[in-house]
Structures are given as C-alpha cells and as structure tokens.
Image: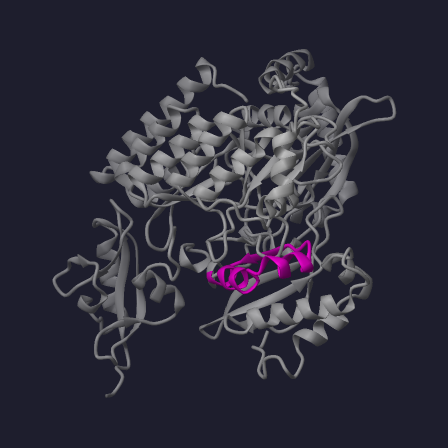
Amino acid sequence: MTKQSFSKIITANLLHTGDVVYLDQESNWVHQIEKALVVSSEEQIDSLVGAAQQSEVIDPYAIDVSTENPEISAIGNREKIRQQGPSVIAI
Amino acid sequence: MYQYDDFDSAYVAERVNTFRHQVEKRLDGRLTEEEFKPLRLQNGLYLQLHAYMLRVAIPYGSLNSQQMRALAHIAERWDRGYGHFTTRQNIQFNWVKLVETPDILKALSDVGMHAIQTSGNCIRNVTADHFSGAASDEIADPRPVAEFLRQWSTDHPEFLYLPRKFKIAVTGSSNDRAVTKAHDIGLRIIKNKSDEIGYEVIVGGGLGRTPVVGTVIREFLPQVHLLNYMEAILRVYNAEGRRDNKYKARIKILVRELGIERFRDKVESEFERLNDSADKLESINEKTERERISEFFEPPQFDTDTDLFEFEAARRNNPFFREWVKTNVHNHKQSEHAIVTISLKATGAIPGDASSDQMRAIADLAETYGYDDIRVSHEQNIILPHVHKRNLPSVYAELRKHKLQTANVGLISDIIACPGLDYCALATARSIPIAQKISTHFSDSAYAKAIGEMKIKISGCINSCAHHHVAHIGILGLEKGGVESYQITLGGDHRENLRLGDRAGPGFSADEIVPAIERLIDAYLGLRLDPQETFLTAYQRVGMAPFKAALYTEQGPKQALAS
C-alpha cells in the first residue's frame, strides 16, 4: 500500500470537557480518530483551524497521521498518547 | 493550622462566584478562548493532553482531615477517584471538566482551600519543610512565616504580572528539607550571635532548563524586615527581569546577568527607600500580624504518656512493622512522639497518586492519632507530623488495610516523578512508566535496604518538575528523533548544600534505563567503602569515572542513543 504524501487531520479538545477530538468529514468533532477528515493542503488546514476557533473546541491544530493501516492512526508519542490515553493505569 | 477569617472566606467565595460567571460567559461565547485562558489559569485550571487539569494549592503542604476528605470527595465526584500530589506540595486532578470546575472550587472554598495562584506569572504557593513544627532539628516553625508570606503575596496587586512565575520556600531547620536553594527566594530561619531569630535570604535559585544554585543575598535579615525585603527583591525583579524571552525571564537569569553584588545593591537600595518612604510596610503592624498568625501554629497539647510498651512490643515481634519504623518514622521534637511518612510509592505505583479511599484513610488516621495535622512533602509522600509512638502499631495496621504501608522512604523505590507525557502538555517523554519499572525492579526490600539511601528523580521534560538536577540519580526524559531518550545525571543533592548533578553521557532508551540503573547500583555496591557510605557520598569520593564506565560498558547497551 502506498503511503499518502500529505496526511494530516485536525485535532482539538472539547471546550466543555477537555476531551480529545478530531474533525470529521461533516465538520463534527468526534472522539474516533478513524473518522477524521484527512486534509489535502496547507490552505485547507488554515481554513479549518481558523473556523474551529469559533466552535466548541479549544486549541485546534493539525497533526500528521499514518493512513497505511488503512485506518488513520496518530504518529509520534504525544499524539499516540492523546489518542489512546495515558500508557499507565491509575489507582 | 491557620483558619480563614471572614475576609479570607469572603475573598475566596467571591473568586469562586467570579469564575463561575467567567465560565458561563466562555460557554455561551461571550468570552473567546484567548480572553478566557488567562482567567482559568489564574484559577489553576490548565488544559493538558487529555483533559483539563486543576491544580489546587495546599499552603506549605499543610492540611487537616476535613480538607483531605474534601480532596477525596472532589476526586470521587468530579475526577476519576484519585489525585496526584506534586513536588510543590499541591494536588492535581487530571480529569476535571470545565463546566464542573466552579463546583469544585466551591467545594474547596467550603473547607478553606482554593486554586488561586497555582499558575501564571505570579508568586505561587509558598512551600515549606514538611516536618515543620515537629522536627527535632528545628530552630523555629517555618509555617507562620510561610502563611505570612502567603497572605502578603495573595492577590498582591504589584506582583500579579511578574516577568515569570515566582517560587518561595521556607525552612526552619539547619537540615534543609525544603530545597530552598532551588527557589526564586529561599528563606532559612536562623539565629544570630545574639540568639535573635531572623532569616538567611537566598535568591536566584531554580531548576528547569537553566539550573542555578541560589545565592545568599542577606546573611541575616531581622524578622521585622521580612516583608519590606521581600518587597524590595520583587520590585527589582519586576522592573528589571526580562519579558522578551520566557526562557530568560526567571529571577535567576537576572541575578546571573547582573551579578549578585549589583543585584544586592539594587535590592538594598530599594529596601532602604522602602523603609524611608510612605510605601513602608509598617514594622509595628507587621509584628502584630506575624504574632496573630503565629498563634494558629501553636503546638498541640501533646500527650505526655511515657508508656511505650505497645510500641516496643510491636517493634520486637513484628518484623514488617520494625522495618517500616526504620524507614518511614523519624524523630520528633517530643521524644514520645514520632513523625510518620506515608509512602505513596508502593511497588509499581504512580508516584504521588492517592485514591479517594486512601485520602480518607489518611484523614481518619490524622484525626484519630495525629492531632488533625497532615502534610504533603515535595517528595510526593504524605506526612503525619505528630503521632504518639504508642499509636504507631495502630497507624501501621490501618495503613496496611489501604496499601499505604510501603516501607521505602528514602530508598531506591521512593522515586519522585512528574506526570510526564502520559498527562502533561509540556512533556517530551513519559516519566511514570520509568518510575514504575525501576520501582518494580528494585522491589526486593532487603536489596533496597542494602543499597541504602537513594534519591531517584525523573522529569519528563527540561522544565524539571521532578527536580532531577538535584537527584542522586537524575533522569531526564527527552525526545530524540521521535523516540523517548533518557539522560542520566549523577551526584545531585537537594539538601542545604544543594548541588546539581553531573550529566553522565548519551541517553538511554526506555528499555535500557533499568539495566543502566542496575549497572550504576552494582558499581556503587562494588566500590563503596562500607554499607554506611551512601551512593551520594561514594560518588563524591570517586567522581563520575567509575560510574560512567559502568553505564557505558560493553555489557551495556550496544547503541546508546545519541545525546
């Protein structure tokens, strides 16, 4: 399977709860990264992040993702942990 | 302990109401996030990786059973049933919701607590020796001073927008358990030749990305001048500290750039001007206020019963109790009493975490056996500062029921660790799993005791919340090429002669770190003169070379990560 040359999605935290969410194809903020909209250009990122500033989320930004699985998954420790939750089990 | 007066209660209640309105405005869109963020931070509410995090101030780490139960209730009702005690003697709740935060703050205010000034470029929660009022080596109790400074610094209009955050620590003992030389201002209560009590004032210490050992700016400051002198230091810093670069904005950078002599001249000049001006904080009133505050910290009416039969019998007959007493119980200024340290470092546990049930159990113990006094240590443990020795077997038995009996205080598994990349938005690597691995690896208590005193501190980024610079073995987690890499420093010392550790060399991967620590320990056990020579003392005697050789031996990692 060929890796896409430009694989980014938009993520943020929900204003009310702080939950990690991703922007889907219908402009909804969802908890499942698999449903995220893969954006195709920097212009689209700027547009979507700008629009998100006015919505029910905070700190929206674009992240690199892998689409090889073929499901979308986060790249890098920080975003993997944001996606999956802490790697440790609390009391 | 200090009790809120009407003014305090009204102020905190008003802050809760104000924040409730601010949250409402944010939720209905009248406030943007840009407008709201500084407001939530002023109330201790951060956004971390997965959720909001609320940092609650525990003034100088001191609380009573009612307050501990309130923390347990908050954890249970609005979080996930636990809280994380921090190296600044505070508690953090990792999973709170914005919409519920005003209710949490209300619950805190009901028991005389808040989250004010636990964030932002202001004077943060004043910290102090966790053994204060109980330690056998104490010159004077530092809590009245810390409370005095807390009241002075809370909502101080001149110092709410400093160049950067500002941390003050106070100790009343010659054995410094408050890490005063690693703070923006450190105060050590001392006596002069005339036997008068005053302060040695230390300035410009700090850890973080630029670790600096604090410097003495005043060898002896009479008590009555404390506020004016603090005011003078803060004014010089506020006026001349850098605001163009947050990494160079702490007072330690200003002191370093000016040199201590020039900085001192400026402070003394401002101090003199303050003393001669209408801005002077009236010394007579200051004295009266200090005395008023001190009355809240009068020692309890200690039980003077000298019958220690039960204690001695338990120590004789129960080896587990005996070991716990050896490690977790310290001398009290009253010989019939003891200071109990409750370890929050059970094997494989998350350092500093306590469940609601555990918090309630600690509250019950404090109420029943501990004169209703509880402390949080910067080493992420809980202290019962006053327990009659007769009651130690009962305390131990209760602790066992709640998995709080781990006998490892001061040993290799008594690890300080920040939340790291599992929670923290600033972190570059995980620290908790590393602490868990080390704790589990060295869980054999006989082996841990054979190793002896050991301070391992693990930070998940350069900000050094876990104080890794002053650890015997410090571990700093970084990210190198997308992989977590852990740098080791050796020979740090957090006590009165604060010393920064020396960096050993290239970092290790997460999988390599436990074997690396094992090799360090093996090297130490092999070269120490006798079992009384601690790791730190041995390091000071032989230096880095043998430990570096052990770390980077051919039997070790074939490819240590590039530094």
The front one of B82 and B442 is B442
- Left or right side of B459 for B313: right
Residue at image coords 83%, 26% = B192
Query: In this orientation, does residue B166 appear?
Result: no
The stretch in magenta equals B433-460
| Quarter of the image where one finds residue B304 | top right
- Left or right side of B562 for A89: left
| Residue B452 among magenta residues | yes
Rendering coords of residue B348 (x, y %)? 47, 58
In this view, the residue farthest toward the bottom is: A1
Residue at image coords 51%, 62% = B440
| Residue B435 among magenta residues | yes
Rendering coords of residue B246 (x, y %)? 54, 51
| Quarter of the image where one finds residue B334 | top right
Rendering coords of residue B450 (x, y %)? 68, 59
Say if A2 sits above or below B404 in the image.
below
Rendering coords of residue B473 (x, y %)? 65, 60
The front one of B317 and B248 is B317
Query: In this orientation, does residue A16 appear?
Result: yes
Q: How many marks?
A: 0
| Quarter of the image where one finds residue B236 | top right
Model colouring: one colour
- Left or right side of A58 for B88: right
